[in-house]
Image (cartoon, coloured by chain):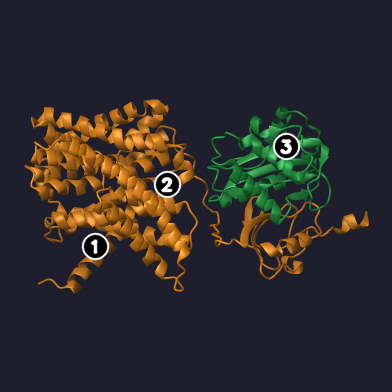
Amino acid sequence: MITIDFLLLIGAVLLLLSILFAKAFQNLGIPTMLIFIGVGMLAGSEGIGGIYFDDAKLTQSIGIVALLFILFSGGLDTDWPSSKAVMTPAFVLATLGVFLTAVIVGIAVMLLFDTSFLWGFLVGSIVSSTDAAAVFSVMRAGNIRLKGRMKPLLELESGSNDPMAIFLTIGSIELLLFPEKPALNILWLLIAQMGLGGTLGLLGGKLMTHLVNRLKFSYEGIYPVFALALAILVYSFTANVGGSGFLAIYIAGIVMGNKQFIQKRSLIRFFDGLAVLSQITMFLTLGLLVFPSEIGDIWWVGLLISAILIFIARPLSVFLTMIPFRFSFRENLFASWVGLRGAVPIILATFPLIMGIENSDLIFNIVFFIVLTSALLQGWSINPAARLLGLAEQEEKKKSIPLEFISDKDDETVLEEVIIPFNSGVIGKQLAELEFPDTSRVVLIVRSESNIIPNGKTELMEGDVLLVLIKRSDAEGIRNIIQMPSRDSEDT
Amino acid sequence: MKLSDLLSEKYIISNLKSRHKEDVINELIDLFRGDDKVNDIEKVRASVMDREKIMSTGVGKNFAIPHGKTDAVNDIICAFGRTNEPIDYQSLDSQPVHLVFLIVGKDTMVSTHIKLLSRISRMMTKDGFREKLLKETTVEGIIKHFREEEANYFEL
């Protein structure tokens, strides 16, 4: 009998190992998901850990919960103004692009391995969506800055293309199991998934923001828990009425992240932590689930389908669907390369296992192999690819001071830049002499583009930019102080 | 990034028509109409006017630097205008304004925003540079002066 204490010990050790390995390898540019999967595989039945784990159902559940948090946190972090401009191309990529990818892979599998088209199409569908967790983690790793529309496009695509892949997978499973089922039912599934997912996500996001702002909790610790419950509610409600919960929670995150609400910063941080935990847990579990020896048997099949996906299916669907949007050839090439596959395919690959589709363990192993090669080959090379194609921006020097101020809803106190007038009487005076109002503070002085943290003895100079936390009612007093006439002008 | 990279010809008015503070700000903001960087021009206007309400940005020596931060732009955007006629700007030194530099920053890029403010403030404290701009009446000339002056400064 395994006790909970023992399970916790294993969990803690695996988490710590994942974090430590990720830190140790961070300079090599290995996508962290590979490290986590690697730790899982090492700990697994055929690794040194020898933990026997083959519960596809549990893995699927963990994957769903993890993805829910990853998508919500990703949505919260999405900058809507820059995403809005690429909404249409992202939507086309996330629907038509996904479908094309699935069809091309399906045809290739059918021709190469003499399977039925539907079986091939099932494999294609499972690997048809790019992975939000993987794309976000690569795009936001901090060592890449993409020019123009590529970053919002690829993030938006990866966050919103899962419903299509889920739909295609479930649709082809249903057709394999019940060939007589009318195609119309399956189309209806798509409409419900997208329509309900989109609508409920939009409403859910607005409702969440409203509730968080409306209900005042005296204890701050309540807010994350409250938001967490609401997020899970948005997902589960949508999924239970037949919509895509993943799409809903991602959209709810975007809506909320671009509105003002109480405790915004701490909530975003809370969900960020949760998303990291989810990523590690999910990839660890997937690593545990796989039996490397079985993958070894089908390595050439996996490699071949991988190559088709990476070099034919993804580029073809990107270039074809993006024709109306006039991206440059280089941009299309880059978008083709950021076709990272991740957790969703592996989670989707557990569906046929659970549904008892013929050769479903083969599908699972093939998909796992595809995800590994995609993460290894593409995840590793995205930064060089961006630089090679001239799409990377020069990295800003990061010696800046973190400046952010989220005002309360009433914004009675604001953080504003104030420039010391060119002929002001305060020039040469120390801050302490100025007798600023007690409710306002100079928090930073920027002189000749360099930051100075002020103290009472800091002398002011002509043209200094002061970052001042100003209470609006103090503004006039401060104005009177800094426009004090200088002695020279008094003389004249 | 340099200020002079941000300041192309379409963002410069060599002969401002308006004579009053708010009209001048509006005249410059109207240059942003239809710009890719701007998602909501009214929000941009509101952010600049709101900042002006707290304290005038007429910093003296005939120069004003209206600015604001907002989520309605997706990148920093600026404009410059000059005029031979005096503008009533309620400046901190109570003198009329002839040179106006407008900066609208993205609310999540405070650090860059404040550095650009520092850059323009530093350039404008130089009497010689201000004199050149006061005398220059062509858009091309204005751009040239900004480029030459900023050539001595590092990239932000």
Q: Amino acid at mark 3?
A: Gly
Label 2 vs label 3, nearer the camera: 3
**Alpha-carbon neighbours of circle 2 within 10 Å: few (<14), some, or many (≥20)?**
few
CA separation in Å, label 1 and label 3: 61 Å
Given residues A243 and B15, the one toward you in this image is A243
Shown in green, the chain is B
Residue depicted at x 33% and y 29%: A321
The residue under label 3 is B81
Q: Amino acid at mark 2?
A: Asn
Measuring from the top left, give residue A70's x and y in whole percent. Answer: 33, 53
The residue under label 2 is A143
Shown in orange, the chain is A
Determine the image quadrant of residue B1: top right
Measuring from the top left, give residue A347's x and y in whole percent. Answer: 20, 49
Disc 2, SS: loop
The residue under label 1 is A14
Measuring from the top left, give residue A289's x and y in whole percent. Answer: 15, 54
Determine the image quadrant of residue A434: bottom right
**Alpha-carbon neighbours of circle 1 within 10 Å: few (<14), some, or many (≥20)?**
some
Task: Write down the chain letter for disc 3.
Answer: B
User: Quick check: can you spot residue A24?
Assistant: no
CA separation in Å, label 2 and label 1: 27 Å
